[in-house]
Amino acid sequence: MILGAGAVGIEMAGEILAQWPDKKVTLLDPSSDVLGGNYPEKLRTALRKMITEAGVDLRLGEGFTELPEAPAGVVAPFTAQTTMGQTIEADLWLRCFGGAVPSDYLAGSLAAARNTSGTVRVGDDMRVEDHETVYAVGDIADLGLPTAFLADLQAEVAAKNIRRHIVGEKEGQDATFADPFPHLVVPFGPGKGTGWLVHQEDLLDDAAVAQLKGDHLLVAMYTDKLGLTEGAWTLGH
């Protein structure tokens, strides 16, 4: 049982079925469609088709009346009632919705810049709202999708502007952030998936998704960026 039919929930369903093709997977979401956000309808249509053809029991517009007592991510058989009056039995449920940024450590004027989701309001120069010398990048910044790819770009902008502030550069303009090509790549296991690039008319096919993300999930790129060796990654350090 996967709760949440956004990109994370869809990818999770695909990874499970790639490893265990005979596993029965139910994907539940109280929203009326998959994938929240400002994406083209053809992407959602392709995702629904991909999910259902894989044998996933996709239930949209339906949620649990209350979360199971069994902890998420722990094998513990449970029975739950849905908002449509259905009874569901499952051995495991995975929470793929409602992610919040843990920023409750912020205090004073920084706390005032927080949104209800835990993000902080920033300008396109990555400065926190009403703060001249405080910057925020990555998941905590409410600018762009919360992806590692965009966090890298935001960090470059913040670093340039911090340097300008330190050395006292007066000429020129601050660096600003803009998503260079709004996109979404949704693998469904290592060899399947679909995706969208803003400047491309057709959706990405299986081969393109596998090459961009599905076959490797960008693990090697980020272990390099973080200075991790293959052995250290395997050990979970």
Image (spheres, helix red, strand yellow):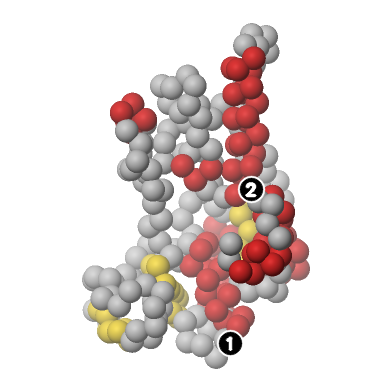
Residue 216 lies, in percent from the top left, at: 70, 66
Q: Based on the displayed image, in which of its 4 quarters is residue 179 positioned?
A: top right
Foreground pick, 216 / 27: 216
User: Amino acid under label 1?
Assistant: Pro
Q: Which mark is residue 149?
A: 2
Figure quadrant of the N terminus = bottom left
* Residue appearing at x 60%, y 83% in the figure: 19
Q: Which mark is residue 21?
A: 1
Figure quadrant of the C terminus = bottom right
- For the residue labelled by badge 1, is the local secondary structure a helix, a strand or a loop? loop
Q: Which mark is residue 87?
A: none
Residue 233 lies, in percent from the top left, at: 64, 64
Q: Based on the displayed image, in which of its 4 quarters is residue 50 positioned?
A: bottom right
201 in relation to 167, above or below: below
* Residue appearing at x 36%, y 46% in the figure: 117
Residue 38 lies, in percent from the top left, at: 51, 49
**Count of all numbered marks drawn on residues in the image:** 2
Q: Is residue 172 visible?
A: yes
Q: Is residue 82 visible?
A: no
Q: Is residue 141 left or right of residue 148?
A: left
Residue 222 lies, in percent from the top left, at: 67, 54
161 in relation to 213, above or below: above
* Residue appearing at x 62%, y 11% in the figure: 168
User: Amino acid under label 2?
Assistant: Phe
Foreground pick, 51 / 17: 17
Q: Is residue 149 left or right of residue 59?
A: right
